[in-house]
Amino acid sequence: MRPGLYDAVVNLDQAVYFAPRGRSRLMQLGDLIAQRYLNPEDRVVGLVGDAGAGKSLLIRGMIPGLVLTNDDDGINIRPLPVLSDAETGFFDTHTYHVDVRFEMAFCQIWEMAHAVRKAIAQGRRVIIEHFDILYPALEFNAEILIGIGEEVVVRRPGLFGPDPEDIKQRVYESLVYRKMAHSAEDLTSIVLTEMGFQPPQIHSDVKRGFVLEFRERPDIDLDELENGVHKYIDSDMPISYYDDHHITIGGEKFYCSGPRLHMPSTAAVEGFRLIKEFRYSPLSQTFLLAGLIGG
């Protein structure tokens, strides 16, 4: 561990990040969280967040090379390694992965809790998705809790919490705004293309919104751009996952860096508006255009 990093780990109360919407950016954030807050001796890492929030991608960034037992593409390993190793009493892996909600289709909660207890007693680490479901049966908290909604919240629980349910309430309620912002961001890029402009490849985040960064100030009619997005919203077109790099809107395929994180239709995007000016950043030497959603 790098000098000075230990204090940042043991004294962590709360760290909050905007939850990125692209696959690459989410894995990069996972890598950052692992470097800053994951202690090599942590044995229980709990993740909380609804389906599609990006838990698996965050784990891939935190622990490269860890084979997840399942992910959005399907089942990777059966039976559950930590469960089968608990039955034999021989744990041949240092780090195990458990998706509690998924595994409930195959075994009982108490079986998972028993297997996790045996694994950590042998000095193994267990990464647990949907930790809030397992927590009552496990009867002890994770050493580090990570919630994923509109924000990524990192907490190191103490004697007085927080409990996983506290994290769950916060991130479940906010995830819809992240989905709205991502859907609106993609619609804005589509309308920019229709207007004859190349959508920027640089994106950043603001609370309940998005930021597009242009290397040069484009001559764009922002009222026309905003109205174009509203036409898509008013048309109520379905938004669907196509593959790892594309979505479909109204049956037409478009590139997207985070195709699983969208509202089900364009009409589900509420309160979209653009900030009607470009802000210049002398640090990045880019022109920034912000879009907002919600109230």
Image (cartoon, helix red, strand yellow):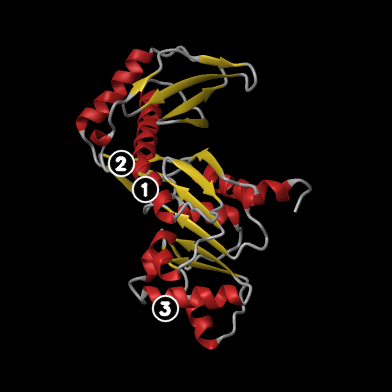
Q: Amino acid at mark 2?
A: Met
Q: Amino acid at mark 3?
A: Glu
Direction from residue 237 to residue 258 in the image, left or right: right
Query: In terms of image quadrants, where is residue 51?
Result: bottom left
Label 1–label 3 contact, CB within 8 A: no
Vertical placement of residue 263 versus 52, above or below: above
The residue located at (53%, 49%) in the rendering is 155
Q: Which residue in the protein does label 3 denote?
A: 111
Direction from residue 202 to residue 122 in the image, left or right: right
Sort mark 3 into few (<14), some (14-19) or many (20+) by Cα contacts within 10 Å: some
Q: CA distance from mark 3 to mark 2?
A: 35 Å
Which is nearer the eye, 214 or 274? 274
Is residue 30 among the parts visible in the rendering? Answer: yes
Q: Which residue sits furthest bottom?
A: 88
Label 2–label 1 contact, CB within 8 A: no
Q: Which residue in the protein does label 1 denote?
A: 169
Secondary structure state at the residue bearing disc 1: helix
Query: In terms of image quadrants, where is residue 119?
Result: bottom right
Q: Which residue in the protein does label 2 denote?
A: 263
